[in-house]
Image: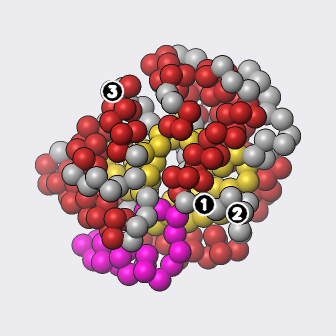
Amino acid sequence: MQSPPKATSLIDTHAHLDVEAFAPDRDDVLGRARSAGVVAQVVPAITRGHWEGLAELTARHEDLFPAYGLHPVFLDVHGDADIGALDAWLSDHPAVAVGEIGLDGYVETIASGAAWDRQWRLFTAQLDLALNHRLPVIIHARRALDHVLKALRQRPGSTGIIHSFSGSRQQADQALEQGFCLGFGGPATYPRANRLRRLVADLPDDALVLETDAPDQPSVSHRGERNEPSFLPEIAACVAELRGVSVAELARQTTANARRILHLSTTTP
């Protein structure tokens, strides 16, 4: 596997730096990421209770960018008033996206019946909020990609990132036609992830962005550890090798994709 050159600049489009797992050493985590060439990180919220802390965190660090939303896995935490609260919050607080939002078909307790219907209502309401606020979205689509794509087809103006993409090439093409980028991280580094790695190798240059999903989904060499953004160069090196390009070229393209899809200025870190 190639080693990223020191000059390589990377953007982590998905890192939950605001969560409790990073409370003991968050500043050290940020320092390691910067030393590794991670020039910007997008931090998506998971519940309403995280918004204020996330706003304070990202205000202190110019290379951290907030996204606000209601994560589907935490369905039992979300209240009926949270959509209205999110609308008001987005009106008063800068954000690069609405997220992390989406649908989850993996957690059995929320994957059917009334809970699934509520997931759908919250997801589609947040898609509509994003359109109203002219923001991209960051989407969680675990075992629910066809349902997510259905909702997106109903909203032609929606754009953003489908996080931790693990679908088929046909599903990828549908997302790309909608104007989305696809996020790839630690799972692509596992040698047995054959279908995912073939997809990563074959997608168009403008389709991919990189992510860690820290503290979750560590890359293969950090299996069992807390994931963190400083591990992003390993993901970049793996993706570059799969695509047959240099790490520098892969970094240039994925960074440009992240800036484009999230409307990050080239003058930002």
Label 3: state its secondary structure.
helix
Neighbourhood count class around disc 2 (C-alpha, 10 Å): few under 14, some 14–19, many 20 upward: few
Q: Which residue is mark 1?
A: 264
Is residue 235 depicted above or below 46 in this figure?
above
Q: Position of residue 88 (x, y in %)?
A: 38, 81
Q: Which residue is mark 2?
A: 268
Residues at circles 2 and 3 in contact by the CB criterion of under 8 Å: no
Q: Which residues are magenta?
A: 78-99
The amino acid type, in three-letter code, at marker 1 is: Leu
Compared across the picture, whether 28 is left or right of 18 comes to right
Label 2: state its secondary structure.
loop
Q: Identify the residue at the far right of this view.
A: 6
The amino acid type, in three-letter code, at marker 3 is: Gln
Sequence-wise first label, 3 or 1:
3
Q: Which residue is mark 3?
A: 170
The amino acid type, in three-letter code, at marker 2 is: Thr
Q: Position of residue 191 (x, y in %)?
A: 58, 17
Give the distance between the C-alpha atoms of the residues marked 2 and 3, in whole angstroms.
34 Å
Give the distance between the C-alpha atoms of the residues marked 1 and 2, in whole angstroms.
7 Å
